[in-house]
């Protein structure tokens, strides 16, 4: 072996170090950061280097899934001479493949941003790439974390970087509000992860998810830990009712939406379940809850997406729906289908958001009504977007078909019929609303916004082509990915697959009939009027606002009253009593020696009497 050959641990460390170095260089050299495009080239170069290291890891791990994970870590926290927590990397099939997914998507987004944000001031563009590098480092650190404490630290860094990227247009009030909303909703959910860490440590004395730690947890500890962890997942991965931040996060630049929605921020929640799955498997009640909540989120979000006119919000709700698929699959007790869909979803959802960015770049509007007739002018971008839409819809042969089929098979095998039916319905709705988007944006009636539309520059087209290839082919790599993750998988056309494919084709047909005649169909869709009414009335948001005003402020007001009048009152009364007693006793201090002699004699007599009495 050559002296320069890197171990897997070394490659993983360098993969994480590259974006960190980029962040430090740009963050500590304002002159370089304010150059804009040059700062972008620096960030892209380090992201590319990180991608190369990740690819080398996957190549080495692909056919060695049976081998134990490679772990490199150093002592970090000690208590009473005992090691409490370490920091380092864990490289196995799951983390290696996830590193490739994250780095490839991040690199595509960064290259795409050069063209999409070409009008941004240099200082703002440099700031954008600085936050990008921080975000990529945080996500990679989360992926390779060997224990839950390090994962938690990187989890919080991901939240911070997401806040900065969503609020990139911070001078725009709606963008600032969206960033704050995303931050606080996810921070509220993150209380669960912090509390879960405490439970894990109390029961096991470690922050590991090893079988030994799960055994120490027992049924009660596992239920509490998994339940609290899942609260954090609900916030980060936008599960009902903590999905409310996701549509507002579309206020950030479209490439940011691609980054957050494809393989990074929202995927972090699902990845947390995958990484700590031994704990979840020991908590069957939590798994059942996950299965039903994920299925409901998928159906609910799919219905909402059917009536959205902002192309980015359609894709935002579709993200929540697809995350619901993943959560439901993991809740059914199978790790591989949920993780498989996480990987395929990263490819086609990044493709869809960047494709939507190309359409928005052409017409300078997010509204579907302003995008009609773009197909003749945007053949490459339009083709890429259609490929992404077909993958999301689960059309046979595309990536989403294989992973969705695996999820539906698991639910049917477990006789979880209600979630299975809900996800089948969501599959049909997904095909319908994506057909609606394609018809309105690419083949609808042209408007004045499309008069000067033209194809995107090469820096935007290249990532679209790469991701389109992934959306076409990644489903066929399921067996290799399963091997890397230590599972077995062989595709077979099942009953669920046939039904889901039929519903997808039906949804495409209905969408074409409704929106394929150059006519925009406004207003509510009667079949979905109830759920759409809930969304338009902001019922979920208002419920949270009511809970804050009435419940939270009411309880905090009661606590404040108790603190002010009971706790402080007792302390103030004690101080007053001490002061008054001191003033009364002060009279005994006369300063005359005779009085003190009398006091000594009286004390001696009292002591003598007490001794005699005893």
Image (spheres, grey):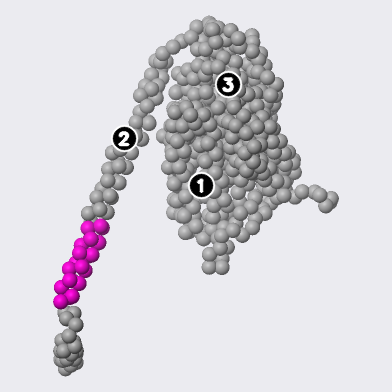
Circle 2 sits on which residue?
546
The span shown in magenta is 567-587
Magenta run includes residue 571: yes
Residue at the (51%, 15%) spot, across then down = 368
Location of residue 164 with respect to 454 vertically, above or below: below
Q: Earlier in the sequence, mark 3 or mark 2?
A: 3
Residue at the (61%, 59%) spot, across then down = 75
What SS does tag 1 mark? helix
Labels 3 & 2 near each other (Cβ < 8 A): no
How far across and how far down the image is residue 314, in percent? Answer: 50, 22
Circle 3 sits on which residue?
356
What SS does tag 3 mark? helix
Location of residue 28 with respect to 358 vertically, above or below: below
Residue at the (59%, 58%) spot, across then down = 76
Labels 1 & 2 near each other (Cβ < 8 A): no
**Viewer-nearest of labels 1 and 3?**
3
**Residue pushed farthest right?**
2
User: Between marks 3 and 2, how big is the CA–CA gap?
Assistant: 35 Å
Which of these two is toward me, 144 or 297?
A: 144
Q: Earlier in the sequence, mark 1 or mark 3?
A: 1
Which of these two is toward me, 551 or 290?
A: 551
Magenta run includes residue 579: yes
What SS does tag 2 mark? helix
Q: Is residue 149 left or right of residue 93?
A: left
Residue at the (67%, 26%) spot, across then down = 463
How far across and how far down the image is residue 264, in percent? Answer: 58, 36
Location of residue 166 with respect to 379 vertically, above or below: below
Q: Quadrant of residue 478?
A: top right
Which of the numbered marks, if any, corresponds to residue 280? 1
């Amino acid at each position: 072996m050559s002296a320069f050959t890197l171990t897997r641990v070394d490659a993983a460390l360098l993969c994480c170090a590259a974006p960190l170095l980029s962040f430090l260089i740009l963050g500590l050299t304002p002159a370089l950061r304010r150059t804009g495009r040059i700062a972008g080239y620096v960030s892209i170069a380090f992201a590319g280097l990180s991608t190369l290291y990740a690819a080398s890891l996957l190549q080495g791990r692909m056919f060695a899934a049976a081998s134990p994970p490679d772990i490199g870590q150093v002592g970090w926290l000690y208590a009473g001479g005992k090691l409490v927590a370490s920091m380092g990397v864990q490289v196995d099939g799951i983390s290696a493949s996830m590193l490739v997914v994250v780095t490839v998507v991040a690199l595509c987004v960064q290259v795409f941003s050069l063209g999409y944000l070409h009008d941004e001031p240099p200082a703002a563009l440099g700031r954008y790439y600085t936050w990008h590098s921080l975000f990529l480092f945080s996500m990679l650190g989360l992926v390779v974390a060997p224990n839950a404490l390090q994962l938690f630290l990187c989890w919080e860094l991901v939240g911070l970087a997401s806040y900065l990227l969503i609020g990139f247009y911070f001078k725009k009030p709606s963008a600032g509000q969206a960033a704050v909303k995303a931050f606080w909703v996810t921070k509220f959910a993150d209380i669960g992860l912090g509390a879960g860490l405490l439970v894990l440590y109390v029961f096991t004395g470690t922050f590991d998810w090893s079988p030994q730690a799960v055994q120490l947890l027992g049924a009660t500890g596992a239920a509490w830990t998994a339940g609290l962890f899942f609260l954090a997942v609900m916030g980060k991965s936008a599960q009902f009712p903590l999905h409310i931040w996701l549509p507002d996060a579309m206020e950030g630049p479209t490439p940011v939406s691609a980054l957050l929605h494809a393989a990074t921020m929202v995927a972090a929640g699902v990845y947390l379940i995958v990484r700590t799955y031994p704990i979840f498997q020991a908590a069957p009640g939590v798994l059942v809850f996950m299965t039903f909540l994920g299925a409901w989120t998928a159906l609910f979000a799919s219905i909402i997406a059917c009536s959205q006119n902002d192309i980015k919000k359609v894709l935002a709700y579709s993200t929540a729906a697809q995350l619901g698929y993943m959560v439901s699959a993991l809740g059914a007790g199978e790790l591989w289908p949920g993780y498989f869909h996480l990987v395929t979803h990263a490819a086609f959802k990044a493709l869809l958001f960047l494709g939507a960015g190309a359409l928005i770049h052409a017409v300078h509007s997010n509204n579907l009504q302003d995008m009609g007739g773009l197909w003749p002018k945007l053949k490459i971008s339009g083709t890429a977007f259609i490929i992404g839409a077909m993958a999301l819809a689960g059309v046979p042969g595309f990536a989403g078909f294989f992973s969705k089929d695996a999820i539906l098979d698991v639910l049917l095998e477990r006789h979880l019929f209600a979630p299975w039916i809900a996800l089948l319905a969501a599959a049909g709705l997904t095909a319908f609303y994506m057909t609606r988007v394609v018809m309105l944006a690419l083949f609808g009636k042209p408007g004045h916004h499309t008069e000067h539309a033209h194809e995107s520059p090469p820096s935007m087209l290249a990532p679209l082509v790469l991701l389109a290839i992934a959306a076409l082919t990644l489903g066929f790599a399921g067996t290799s990915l399963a091997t890397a993750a230590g599972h077995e998988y062989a595709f077979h056309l099942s009953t669920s697959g046939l039904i889901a494919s039929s519903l997808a084709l039906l949804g495409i047909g209905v969408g074409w009939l409704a929106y394929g005649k150059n006519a925009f169909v406004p207003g509510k869709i009667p079949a979905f009027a109830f759920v759409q009414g809930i969304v338009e009335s902001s019922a979920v948001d208002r419920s949270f606002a009511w809970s804050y005003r009435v419940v939270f402020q009411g309880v905090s007001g009661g606590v404040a009253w108790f603190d002010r009048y009971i706790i402080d009152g007792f302390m103030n009364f004690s101080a007053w009593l001490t002061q008054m007693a001191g003033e009364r006793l002060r009279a005994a201090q006369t300063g005359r020696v005779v009085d003190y002699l009398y006091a000594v004699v009286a004390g001696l007599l009292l002591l003598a009497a007490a001794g005699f009495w005893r």
